[in-house]
Structures are given as structure tokens and as C-alpha cells.
Image (cartoon, helix red, strand yellow):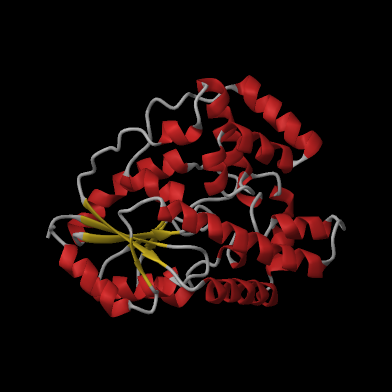
Amino acid sequence: MYPTLVVITGPTAVGKTKLCVEVAQHFSCDIISADSRQFFKELSIGTAKPTSDEMQNVIHHFVNSHSIISAYNVNDFEQDVLKLLPQLFKQNPLVILTGGSGLYIDSICDGFDDDLPQGDEKIRKQLEDLYNKYGIEILQEKLKQLDPSFYKEIDLSNLKRLYRAIEVCLLSGKTYSELRLGVKQKRQFNIIKIALKRDKEDLFNRINLRVDIMMQQGLLDEVKQVEKYRDTNALKTVGYRELFDFLDKKISLEEATEKIKVNTRRYAKKQIAWFNRNNDYKWFHPNDKELIISYIESHLNS
């Protein structure tokens, strides 16, 4: 069998983890996580990491691999995964890549345009000053003006990506969307792309239930434990940001919980939009395990 990377993705709470473990067990292969928050060992409840049983049965790479104080980004991830894959393919010609972070998945499948401008300290300082003075909303509005297309796709709570997208637009005079869709890099392995979907009502109910379960499992305690790191990029995200507002006495715990649900549903919509723009994905319901396995088998070596 020719080395093959099977991408299995979809919006948050759709059911990726359970399915991927079952598919990995069928093919006796490893899983690489492309979830940009599951990398961090300090974050567990709020990132919906695989359970200890799931990770015991199947080897997961890039789960608990870094600390939130590490400067780890999508470019680092691309380089690390491309170094790891040849080793994994020696053990098994099939590897699963899963997660909901579309940018991280695209980095492995297509690479990045090498012509993206390098960072500019002056512009970054100006953007940081804007954020510190007016909050994240002004950066969201700025990106909307500069690149409305990417504005519709990005997780608007991810401060680091907001900074970078605005920075690229200002430095290049072009939109980030244009530049990141440069010439795709040819990989030395086949790629099979699968996306998972549920009815909107079903997905949103799962999201709401997941948030309730996270709160019952102690998400607030987890947030308190990492509060001293709240200025790191890893914590400027849904599930943590809202509870920091509660700790700051800006909102009640009930309001914070509801905001997590609303912002998670909003993020799920953006994930779906991201994957919908790529026609390479074959969509399945997460319960269609046998169909998915058959689809993978029929596309091996093709």
C-alpha cells in the first residue's frame, strides 16, 4: 500500500474522536491530532481531549505534547508532522490526521505559501495596543474590512490568528485569503479527506450538552488553575475566555456558561464553512463507520 494520510475532520462535538479511534483500531494505525488546543498538556476538560482509555487503545500524537507557555504555531506543527510521518509510514502505510483546526490540517495537506510576509514588530505592537485599549472587537472589525472572506472562516476569538491575518494584509496590500491559497505543495503520500456532519439541531444540542458536562467535570477549576497564564494565545479561546470574565466579576457563571455555548456554536459554523470550501472532502455522518471504512479501503492506492 502506498503511504496514505486519512484526514477525518468536522465541527466541534460532531463525534470525531470516537469514530477515529474505531477506524484506527480497524486499520491498526496511529492518530495525529490537528487540534490546536489539544497540544497543550495544561488544558484537558475545555479541549475535549481523547479519554485515557481511547489513548491507551490507539497511539495519539500531538496530544499533551506542549505547554501553554511554549511558542508553538501552525508552521512548527507542519514541520514536526512532516518529520514524523515517514517514521509512522514505516510501521503502517496508513495514518489518521484528525481535528477541527482547518488551518492546521491544510498545512499538512497543502503547505503554506512561502511568499507570506514575515512579521513586523511595529505593526504587531500597534495591533496589540489597539487590543489592550479597545478589546478584541476592534481587531475583528479591522479584519472584516481588510479581508471579509477570511473573516467568515476564522475563529474570531483566536487573537493570534487575528493579529497574523491583519498583519499580512497590511504588509502585502493583498488579502490573507489570496496569499494563503498559493501553489499547493506536493506531498510524498496519498491523502484521503473525510468530513463529518450532523443536522444543525443535533449538532447544536450536542454542543450545549458537552458544555454542561464540561462544567460538571470541573472546567471552572481548570480555568482557575491556568489563570496565571491567561495572556498566552492558547487561552484566548472559547471556553476559557468566558470563564475569565466570570472570575473578573464581569458576568455571572450562568452567563459565562451560556456564552460558551453560543460562541462554540458560532465556531462550529465557521468550521463547517471552512471545510465546505474544499471539494476534496467526502461527507459522512459519524455513525456511518462501516461506510467510512469501505470508502477508505476503496481509495487506497488510487
Q: Position of residue 75 (x, y in %)?
A: 43, 38
Residue positioned 87% across, 58% down in the render: 249
Residue in the image at 62% along x and 47% along y: 156
Q: Which residue lies furthest to the right in this view?
A: 249
Which residue is depicted at the point 21% across and 73% down? 294
The answer to whether 149 is drawn above or below residue 86 in the figure is: above
Give the percent coordinates (x, y) of residue 97. 35, 58
Q: Is residue 215 left or right of residue 272?
A: right
- Please determine whether, in this image, residue 290 is positioned above or below residue 71: below
- Would residue 41 be visible to someone looking at this image? no
Does 5 sit left or right of 147 as displayed?
Answer: left
Where residue 126 appears, as percent x and y from the top left, is 70, 25
Write down the quadrant of residue 141 in the picture: top right
Number of on-image labels: 0
Quadrant in which the N terminus appears: bottom left
- Residue 251 appearing in the image: yes
On screen, residue 13 above or below 173: below
Q: Is residue 234 left or right of residue 80?
A: right
Would you say 272 lies left or right of 8 here? Answer: right
Quadrant of the frame with the C terminus: bottom left
Q: Where is residue 284 in the image (x, y as percent from the top left)?
A: 35, 70
Dividing the picture into quadrants, the one containing residue 161 is top right
